[in-house]
Image: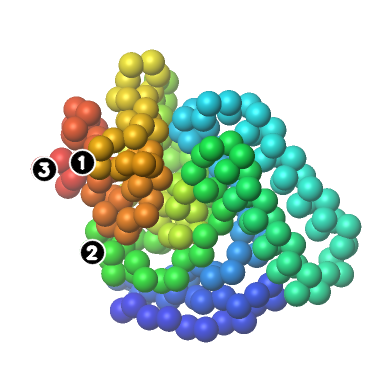
Amino acid sequence: MLGYADLRLPRGDYIVVVRQTPAGELLVGICYNPCIDDLLAHVDDVLNDAEFLDSLADPEEFISDLQSLRQDLQQKIETHGGRATEAELDEIADDFNRQLRELSEAHGVVDISFRSFDGDHLDEFAELGFDASRGFETFEDFKAAYGDAGPGQAWHHIVEQTRNAGRFPAEILHNPDNLVRLPHGSGTIHNKISAYYSSIQPFSRPYRVREWITTKSFKEQFEFGVQTIKDFGGAHLLPPRLRD
């Protein structure tokens, strides 16, 4: 069963996506308008996204600028001391999201602003066999449960996390169905795939592959990501159901 329910929470209008698991558990999705907590968690995910940061020309400067924005947001919250109205909190969130877009443009990277999930992709998740109850709110939570990838290995999001944050539920992005261990380091498949996603290909012109692919649906991104791993000789690293 897939459906929707409207819910009003303290920080904006939310759409709660309701999904029933085979065990009968009801799962909730994600909000339309980003609230402060969503934005802070999103920035923390970006700062912990090693694959994304490794693709940048100057990751240290980008990290410094993003951390400064996060500190400014935290200070604004503390200045209000919990007395901000709902409208003031929405204004702070909207302004911060605008700054994230401007930061992306200044560094010439994909837009890292928090984008809203509208529930249009629920059928895709079900078709691909994704179970949100197995997912996590952050990548750090996933690693706390599943551990580090191991020496010479890295966790790889098949559907990238940073550009898709907010567009798809975190529990789908940080889900064992969307993460695989890949050899990591100079000359490895993980580095080759990262370089490929950062390149401009004939089919993606004038955009980099990671900018082009994130305009697609979740299903298209997932199938492209799986095929890319296969094209770089990593079929054996995928779960058995994805190897054919």
| Whether residue 192 is visible | yes
Vertical relation: 144 (above or below) 53: below
Residue 127 is tagged as 2
Q: Amino acid at mark 2?
A: Glu
Residue at coordinates 75% horizontally, 74% vertically from top-left?
87
Crowd band around label 1 with a 10 angstrom C-alpha radius: few (<14), some (14–19), many (20+): some
Q: Which residue is mark 1?
A: 227
Residue 199 sits above or below residue 25 on the image: above
Location of residue 104 by image quarter: top right
Res 244 label = 3
Q: Are marks 2 and 3 in contact (CB under 8 Å)?
A: no
* Badge 3 amino acid: Asp
Compare residues 98 and 167 and report the one nearer the observer.
Answer: 98
Gap between marks 2 and 3, in whole Å?
17 Å
Residue 214 located left or right of residue 140:
left
Confirm whether residue 159 shows in the render.
Answer: no
Q: Quadrant of the N terminus?
A: bottom left
Query: Residue at the location (63% across, 26% down)?
Result: 60
Residue at x-position 76% and y-position 52%: 73
